[in-house]
Structure formats: structure tokens, C-alpha cells
Amino acid sequence: MATITRPFRGVLRPGRSAGFWTYAALIAVLLGSLFPIYWSLVVASQSNDAIAKVPPVLTPGGHLFENIARVFDTTVFGKALLNSFIVSGSVTVSVVFFSTLAGFAFAKLRFRGRGGLLVAAIATTTVPHQLGIIPLYILMGELGWTGRIEAVIVPGLVTAFGVFFMTQYLTGAVPDELLEAGRMDGCTTLRLFWHVVLPAARPAAAVLGLFTFMQAWNDFFWPLVVLTPGNPTVQYALSALASGYTTDYTLVLTGTVIATVPIVVVFALLGRQIIGGIMSGAIKG
Amino acid sequence: MTSARTRPRRRWAYVLDVKGSPYIYIAPFFLLFGAVGLFPLLYTAYVSMTDWNLLETTREWVGLENYAELIGDAYFWNSLVNTVSIWLLSTVPQLLGALFIAHMLNRSLRARTFFRMGVLLPNVTSIVAVTIIFAQLFGRDFGMVNWLIGLAGLDPIDWQAGTLSSHIAISLIVIWRWTGYNALIYLAAMQAIPNHLYEAATIDGAGQATQFWKITIPMLRPTIIFTAVVSTIGGFQIIAEPLLFQSGTGNPTGGSDRQFQTVGLYLYEQGFGRYEFGYASAIAWTLCLIIVVMAVVNFSITRRIKSG
């Protein structure tokens, strides 16, 4: 609701307005945040010998597109990008849909065992992922999925965090009276979900979708374990590029630029919503 | 509910819909989660009690032998010490920095969306990309950090080779990625503090610093507990940063002398470098236990922050 769609309506505190030092400190923090990303862009746009220059080169050169072409020519980055889009896209759609479905049931329907099941779902968010990684690998082997992107997609199809997030949101966003009225008019639960809950869930679904996409895009460890260098995701391809025996740093940092750009673009366009999501989650959680 | 009794319309279908359909809505989550989340978790316990190597055909039940071996394993203790060291070096400055940044962001600012996005940007970039970039910046020969150190008239540092220096470099990656995120969480909590507390304090003559320590920090207690516990769970599982910080071969040893090998990385080395699934599973369960203990310890430490 208001916390997500309009996250920036904080209380104005006229007595505590920001002075010169506040701005100076924040700008310093900002420069620190931006610098490593900027620097990777600098190296990615230089020719190969620039990395060893003293003093270091600090301004972008004109070789960016040439280097990008070199990455696509010499590595499997094209395939890796495609894999990452497929994985992140399907995981996002699935997580958002199933989380909204389960969130609706937990938030608005009364059934036996509801409280216990919700607590069980939330408790699983605190379990370390690495705990199950070996059996999961064995399981993927049994299914014949080792080395294939199904092995990365299927374990990501639902998240406990998503269920928790949508439950929180739908509890407040859909008035009980509206659902009661729908029931009076003879709506089945499924129709209520489709015509009342889904439209109301859109703002939160967008935030959850963004989080999920970014997380899936940046996921590294599980793909590294279960995929192969010939059929990787972007993060895996990038790590393989960086750990080659003759490391070509321009190539590697061009790879980091390619792997980072889609996320930074999404962030630049929709960062407002992401921040709203983090901050509203913090208030409620 | 009453409508079902007063209206005679197809009662059984209605009852089935109201009482039964919720289970259908939550079923996909629990079925999938059971298969890819819960089952692996429990199965790890079984695998940890076997001598299971992927490259051998025999799988023997060995009971607690793997755990006994682990207790005498110097590499394991080394990795645990490294994990605790990196976790301390990254978490403490990270949370203090986040408090400071949140405090700045909580004033009435121009362009505040811009500043908020700026501090969060590191968090959305990938660990792989960031670690590669930082490994370059901390490079021995051409790294920018050593160049700056040289400008200050000091000798260059071989960041990867030293224990403390590699821990500092890895911690900086974690700090860079997570400080802004935690700052936004603190900021949200700060904005929920009722304004009249500050007004009353101002009337009583309390300065900004006093207000921060006597009002803001105590009011943030639940949030500080939350972030401390979450960063414990995350910090103890750190793998990607130490794995990728070691430039060159992608070795899971965490440096030539294992000087920055974490428990997670040791698990990876045993499980997927040597395919010792039984032993690696024992590491996984032990790590989980350590995380639970540390989370509880942190909970009780941060709980001592005075409320009010």
C-alpha cells in the first residue's frame, strides 16, 4: 500500500535539516559506492596495456565496443547471457505467481494449520542454503539435470521469502469486506483470487519480481556447482573468464561490465520501488 | 460462513471451496520446497554419516566418524578462524557505517531518492563482478590501492599473501556491498521513531549527539538485533568472495597457505574438489550448528542495548 507505492513520505523534521557536512559525507559515500563500477568501465574501454600504467588510467577510452566484441568472440558469453535471461525470467514469474497464491491463502483464508504452516515457511528463510547443497547435487544427478539449466531453475521456483513478503502485503492491501461481498455474490475462491487479489497485489508483485530477478541474475555458487563451463550462466562465465591461466584483465573487466549492466539499468529505472520494498519490509518485519 | 447456512445454494461445493481450496493455494510452495529445500536438508544428515565419495562405488555407513575426523582436522579449524575473523572485520564496521549513513539520510535532504539509490547501488551488483574488480584494485603489482599506498610513501602490500591483509581486503568487499542496504533498513526504522521524543529532548536541552545515543539507538534496538543476526547468518556462509579473490586458477584453497579459506570454501573443496560428499556434509551440518550458536550469541549481545 502506501508504504510501497509512496515510500518516501517520511516525516519532515524541520529542525534537523542537512548542513554542509552532511552533504559532504553523503557525497563521499556515494563516490565510494560508484568508484569500483566506474573503474571497471574505465578498464573495459581501454586497450590491453592500460591496466599496467602508472599512475593508473582514470578516464574511459574508446575501445569499449571492440572489447565487448572480443568477449563474445572468445568466450561463451552469448550463450551465458541467454541462459541467465531464461533462468532469471522463469524463476521470477514462478516465484511471484506461487508467492501471491500462497500469500493470499495465508493472509485472507481461514484453514486448519494456517498459523503453524506460516511459521514453518518463515522459519525456513533462516536455514543456511549451503546445508543442502550436496543432496541437491545428488538429486540433480538422479534426474539427469547436471549441467543443464533446469538444475538452476527448478530449485529457485519458490522462495519462503516471497511467500512471507506477499502474505505481509496482502494482509493489509485487500479489505476483508471486499472478499466477503464477493462471496455473497457467489464468487468462488479462485474467482476472488483472480479478480480481486491479483489486481490488488500488483505493486508488491512488482517489487518481489525485481528482487527475485536480481537475485537469480547474480546467483553464483549453485550454478558453479551444478553447471559446466560450456553451458554456464553469466556469473559462472565471468568467474571462469577471471580464473583463466593467462588472465586478460581488459577482457575480464569487460565481462564484469556486460554482466553488471542489465542489473544497473533495471536499478536505475526502478530503484525507487526497490528501496520502497526494502524499507517497508524493514518496518513490518 | 453464515451465508452458507442461510442460503441453500450448493452447500457442499461452497464448503469444499472454503475449507479445501486454501490447501491447493499453498500446495505448490510446500511441495516444491519439500523437494528442493527440506529433503536435501534432512538427507545431508544421512550423507554426513557415510563414507560417500562420488568417484567410488562403495558407500559405507560410518556413523559419527566424519565428525570425529573433522574435530581433529587442522584445515577445518583454520577455516573456522578465518571465517570468524572475516566476519568480525566486515560486520562491525559495516553496521556502524550503516548507522552513520542512515543518520545522515534521515535529515531533510535535497535529492534524497538520488542519495538512497546511490548507497544501495553496490548491493545490486553481482558478487562475482565486484570481487573481480576488488581483486584488481588490491593487486600486488598494478593495483590502485598499492599505488595510493606508494604515494603516501609506504611499501606496497601483497594483499593476497598475508593473513590479515587478505582478510581486510575480503571484508572490504562485504562492507562495500552491504553497508548501504543496512543503512536503508536503519533509515526505515529511524523514520518510525515518533517525532515528539526528539521535540521533548530538544526542549530539555539535549544536543544532537545526546539525542542520537539516548533516543535513536535505543529505539532502533529491534532493528539492530535483526541486522546483527542476519549478517551472522550471511557472514558465516561466505564463499564467493574468498573463492574469487584468489586470482589465477579458481582454486578453492583460499590462498597458497589457506590463509583466507573460509568454512564454506572448505566445504566446497571437500564436496566438489575431491567429491568427498560424506565429509563435506559433516562440514555443512557443523557449520549450520555454528551459525545457530553465533546467531543466538549475537541476539543476546545486541539485546543488551538499553531500551529507553
Image: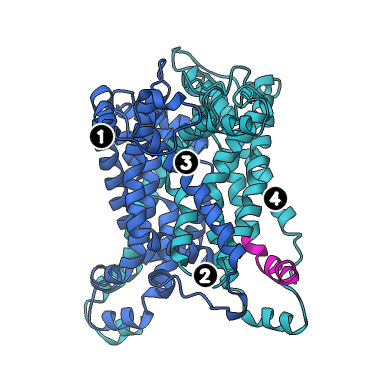
Chain colours: A blue, B cyan
Q: Which residues are magenta?
A: B208-223
- Which callout, 2 or 4, points at the residue further toward the start of the chain? 2
Tell me: residue A157, above or below residue A27: above
Classified by dominant secondary structure, the portion drawn in magenta counts as helix
For marks 2 and 3, give the CA distance.
26 Å
Quadrant the C terminus of chain B occupies: bottom right
The reply to whether label 4 and label 3 mark residues of one chain is no
Residue B9 versus residue A5: which sits nearer the camera?
A5
> Circle 2 marks a residue in which chain?
B
Badge 1 is on which residue?
Answer: A65
The amino acid at mark 4 is: Asn
The amino acid at mark 1 is: Phe
Residue A11: give x, y in percent of width and height.
Answer: 53, 78
The reply to whether label 2 and label 4 mark residues of one chain is yes
Which residue shows up at 68% across the image and 80% down it?
B197
Residue B256 in view here: yes
Badge 2 is on which residue?
Answer: B109
Numbered disc 4: secondary structure: helix
For marks 2 and 1, give the CA distance.
39 Å
> Circle 3 marks a residue in which chain?
A
Badge 3 is on which residue?
Answer: A36
Residue A46 versus residue A263: which sits nearer the camera?
A46
- Which callout, 1 or 3, points at the residue further toward the start of the chain? 3
Determine the image quadrant of residue B217: bottom right
For marks 4 and 3, give the CA distance.
32 Å
Tell me: residue B89, above or below residue A33: above
Badge 4 is on which residue?
Answer: B298
Numbered disc 2: secondary structure: loop
